[in-house]
Image (cartoon, rainbow, N blue to C red):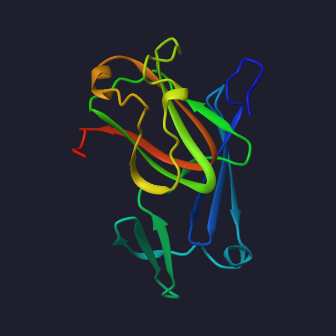
Amino acid sequence: MKSPRGHAETTHINTNIGCLGLIASVCMVGVQMTATLQASAQDQQHATPAPLNIVPTGDAEMSIYHSRSGHRYTLRTDGFISVRAGAAEGELTTKPVRFAGGELVLNVSTSASGSVRVEIQDDAGVPLAGFALADCLPIVGDAIERAVRWSSDPDVGVLAGKPVRLRFVMKEADLFSFRLREKRLK
């Protein structure tokens, strides 16, 4: 959703840890955050579960074991919180950032009909040649480290040290994180 100024009005950040769900609405225009904790009926009757162990149980999963019941709850690695877009396309643009590295990678999950595309802009918000939204190959699927690709395969490393903005355009997707890393050989 966009405000009259063309900025994203509201983005929902979702997390699901065991039987507690946290839904936060973030106002992207004003840097204001409000959060509402929603608990299931079980949580309202009992104290918040205390985890006994948090252990990695796979490349993309961590588990929490409840100390009293022994129940196991699973979490996506580095996926406690996300920016989510539903059926209507949504977008998020970062403040100017400087980075090092040669490859932009996302921790992302989309539905079968969803996607994420990324545009790299200069600090004034103008798309950089080769990194425009129209050049970005749509990202579909579920991955902790999915490299972003553009049609002309430009080298992200040439932007190292320069202030840039990242514009994410998403549909039916969760964006958990993004980072820049050294480019891996194909």
Q: Which residue: 36% across, 31% down? A: 153
Q: Which residue: 46% across, 14% down? A: 123
Residue 129 point in image, percent of width and height: 43, 17
Q: Indicate whether 118 appears above or below 48.
A: above
Q: Quadrant of residue 60?
A: bottom left
Q: Quarter of the image containing the N terminus?
A: top right
Q: Quadrant of residue 128?
A: top left
Q: Indicate whether 131 appears above or below 168.
A: above
User: Looking at this view, is 106 or 39 the one in front?
Assistant: 106
User: Looking at this view, is 21 or 166 the one in front?
Assistant: 166
Q: How many circles with numbers are drawn on the protein?
A: 0
Residue 84 point in image, percent of width and height: 62, 47
Residue 77 point in image, percent of width and height: 41, 61
Residue 103 point in image, percent of width and height: 32, 36
Of all residues, the one furthest to the front in this rendering is: 152
Q: Which residue: 41% across, 37% down? A: 149
Q: Which residue: 72% across, 17% down? A: 5
